Image (tube, rainbow, N blue to C red):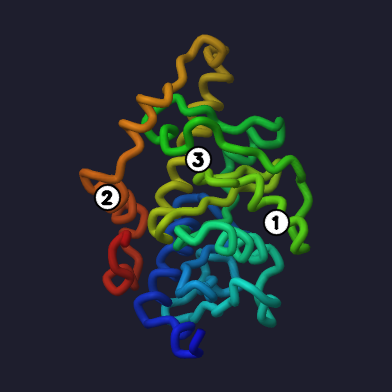
Amino acid sequence: MSAAAAIPTAGEQARVRVAARALARAGLAHAYGHCSLRLDAGHFLVCAARPMGLIAPDEPGVVVPVHGELPAGVLGEVRIHQQIYRARPEVGGVARTMPPTVMALSAARVTPAPRHGMGSYFWPAVPLWDDPLLVRSDAQALGVARALGEAAAVVMRGNGAVVAAPTLPQAVVLTWYLEDAARIEWQLRAAGLADGAPQLDEAQARERAVGTGRIYERMWEYLADGDPEYAGAGGTD
């Protein structure tokens, strides 16, 4: 791999910053969380190690090798990104966040069921990494990636979630969908309606979990609206 192949473009840097701030603005992350974009087979770009909502325009992210040690100053849980990029070459973006309703349900070892349209993207179920500790070792990060498997998201007990998608904007959108699915799950359970509430079957989920009709693009526009660098961050591809 050439050194030049691992140098992010200005657009890639902007996209990571816009994604980070969008996650924070939507209440999906606070002081903690990070997101990344794959640059090539051997490298990815992770946002600056700061609260994502405070990342300034033009503040660069850090290039991280998919295989190898984390660079100085990169947060320890970025190991999760490494393991996901190693295992799933189709993944182009990863978001590690703290969605509040997802967090609350996960403390009881509950993940949202596919009960509505936005939940369909996680059919048949959102896997749970049943460990509340911070992920600070390669062995733990590998465990999270294995729990994720081929799914779009994995919930970490009392410790947020990780979403993986073909692009970083799609990972941001799916993080919002995951929290919305958790909201539905929470409200049904609070009302005592969850046991009798239907879930989408496989055929329904496959038909509903589509990207046509500018599904991802419209939500990305909604979440990124008002960001000072959105114009330079591109679409959802």
Residue 142 in percent (x, y) is at 70, 56
In space, the residues marked 2 and 1 are separated at their CA atoms by 33 Å
The numbered mark at residue 214 is none
Residue tagged by mark 1?
142
Viewer-proximal residue among 92 and 192: 92
Residue tagged by mark 3?
179
Report the side of 14 relative to 151 (left or right): left
The extreme left residue here reads: 213
Q: Residues within 10 Å of mark 2 (few under 14, many from 20)?
A: some
The earlier-in-sequence mark between 3 and 2 is 3
The extreme bottom residue here reads: 3
147 lies above or below 92: above
Residue tagged by mark 2?
218
Residue drawn 50% across the image and 57% down it: 24
Residue 234 in percent (x, y) is at 29, 68
Report the side of 92 relative to 234 (left or right): right
The extreme top residue here reads: 196
Q: Tag 2's secondary structure?
A: helix
Q: Amino acid at mark 2?
A: Arg
Residue drawn 45% across the image and 24% down it: 115
Residue drawn 50% across the image and 40% down it: 179
Residue drawn 56% across the image and 27% down it: 186
Residue 209 in percent (x, y) is at 35, 37
